Image (cartoon, grey):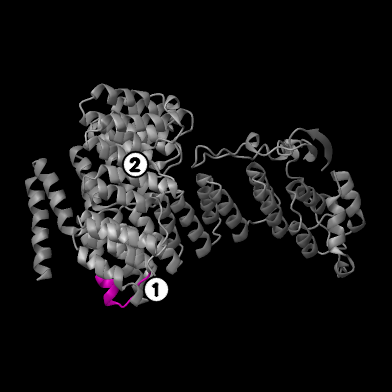
Amino acid sequence: MQLDIIIKPSLSLLSYSQFSHHVHIPNTSKPKTHISKSNLSSSTRQVWTRKPQNSANTAPYLRRKYNRRENQQHIDHSVDMDELLTSMKQTLNEQELFCLLSKYKGRQLSIRFMVKLLSHENDWQRSMAILDWINEQAMYTPSVFVYNVVIRNVLRAKQWDVAYGLFDEMRQRGLAPDRFTYSMLITSFGKEGIFDAALSWLAKMEQDRVSGDLVLYSNLIELSRKLRDYSKAIAIFSRLKRAGITPDLVAYNSMINVYGKAKLFREARMLLKEMKSVGVSPDTISYSTLLNMYVENYKFVEALSVYSEMKDVKCDHDLTTCNIMIDVYGQLDMAKEADRLFWSMKKMGIEPNVVSYNTLLKVYGEAELFGEAIHLFRLMQRKEIEQNVVTYNTMINIYGKSLEHEKATNLLQEMQSRGIEPNSISYSTIITIWEKAGKLDRAAMLFQKLRSTGVEIDQVLYQTMIIAYERAGLVGHAKRLLHELRLPENSNIPRETAIKILVNAGRIEEAVWVFRQAFSFGEVNDISVFGCLINLLSRNRKYSNVIEVFEKMRGAGYFPNSIVIALVLNAYGKLREFEKADTVYREMQDEGCVYPDEVHFQMLSLHGARKDFDSLDSLFERLDLDPNVNKKELHLVVAGNYERLNKLNRASQIMNRISQMETVKL
């Protein structure tokens, strides 16, 4: 194989024509990320490039024999690797490199030495040239270790198409990619946000029966979690367990967080039982993550139950646990318990931080203990405890509740004088206080000033001003702000934010119009935008639009959560497209999506509406064997379907099964 020296304006615009017949560029999970050479960095220098190769001779090495020398003596120890590496780095083209290495053409250096040499080479193009010399000039037996190092260098340079080509070339040379090969590909594509490609590598790995390890699956779960693609994380966790790998404490704690974000509360709670059954003891992080899940979803009684269990098993408290429970006590109108826990933290060896103080301030404010709140706020200043924008926002809100709008305004000025920059919540709180105090003119002037000075207007602030206008009866002003969102570039608001504001305002047509514009420009990168829009459209019976947004969501590589799937199944049912509903239900389940009972029951009802008794019975029997499904509700749903279809005998049989189950329990 021959290489030429060419001069191009970009080192990265290199064309590897050898790979053109087998490079496949998949859709990415992030619309902004494309596997395209035009996106890569640019510089000017001489580059290595391969000449086009006749497609009829794409794999001549399959017929080539690699002669082995019996008892060949290697000279590794007599070669100064650092000196050789320095000389290699000074070469500018293939001819110079090959000339430098020509003295070792008889394979006097071991393949282990060559692998180590490659591992110290950071230039991916020179790595490719060394690979050619190893395979085509020195005629070493192809080595998976050599290819792994070159692929690593190529991936570090984000040359995704070249990585695909090298992978195919390995197979053409009769090499089987190993766990390290797949681990590099999966992790590198995943970290770059090219998630569909990462999962396709995972599928290839499983097809090749190369066993993944806990670290690989845990990395993918963590990447999914960071990308907020929780359904995909759940699917990977299912694959991990199907592969016979027992999750460790870190993996379980990550999945408790994932289930919580996906609002699968029962599954998250059951993970604690599963952990104990496999000998993994839940720790403070396990319980804190579960507590946080319930608090984020306003399930404060359930959080209190988890905290009781945590104390029963004598699990150590940490700062996060205490901060969460101060908030829980406050939400349950248990201000005394919150106060007691805060002041007992030091006895437990836990030093309260600014979050602890801010949380107790909020508890005092919600309990209308304004005096205690002001005392704690000034105590923080006397003790020189750090105060931040949340501290001031909480106190501004407390002054607003006590109808002291001037003191609230003074606090805004005080925080600025102390170098604490107000955020959108600060301004939206002040606007709300002024509006309630009948000072809408001041609120409007502040809003316009913020817009004119280039302050980023987020969803909260924009929505606050719209509500203020509506409450004051200035509907025209509110409509004008909403109309501006059709052209977010004129209002300095990102399209994703504009969509969320319009959704919250119930402006269906405008939200769909902005969504279509944003999607066409690749600007919808937040999975929650799809979810909130689907929810709005479903509530307003815009079922065709629900399907439109869902298909765009899947086309962009996003994995829907169970709530979105439930709304989509309902939309297909309303449109009488039962087969498509069944396809979505099965495909998502095959990909590892964990459904709450409501989704299963909805699918049963769709089979009933279609009068597909075979599918109804088949799904019913399968769910009846699932230990995670509520059996009583399952039987009631199925019996109700048969009753609506005038199949009274079948409905009676199913109801009798409920009676039999209750008798067995007794």
The spot of residue 450 in percent (x, y) is 41, 33
Mark 1, secondary structure of its residue? loop
Q: Earlier in the sequence, mark 2 or mark 1?
A: 1
Q: Residues within 10 Å of mark 2 (few under 14, many from 20)?
A: some
For residue 424, which quarter of the picture?
top left
Rendered view: 544 above or below 376:
above
Q: Position of residue 658 (x, y in %)?
A: 11, 59
| Residue at point 65%, 34% (across, down) | 38
Residue 254, image x, y percentages: 42, 61
Number of marks? 2
- Which residue in the structure is indicated by mark 1? 280
Q: Residue at x 18, y 41 (%)?
A: 608
Q: Residue at x 43, y 26 (%)?
A: 517
Kind of residue indicated by mark 1 = Val
The reply to whether the magenta stretch includes residue 220 is no
Determine which residue is flagged by label 2.
Answer: 584
Between 397 and 565, the one lying in front of the other is: 397
Classify residue 312 by image quadrant: bottom left
Question: Of helix, strand and loop, which one carries label 2?
Answer: helix
Residue 303 visible in the snapshot: yes
Quarter containing the C terminus: bottom left
What span is colored magenta in the figure?
Answer: 308-318
Give the foreground label among 2 and 1: 1
List x then y, in percent, for residue 231: 38, 50
Q: Residue at x 44, y 35 (%)?
A: 455
40 above or below 260? above
Q: Is residue 172 left or right of residue 126?
A: left
The magenta stretch spans residue 310: yes
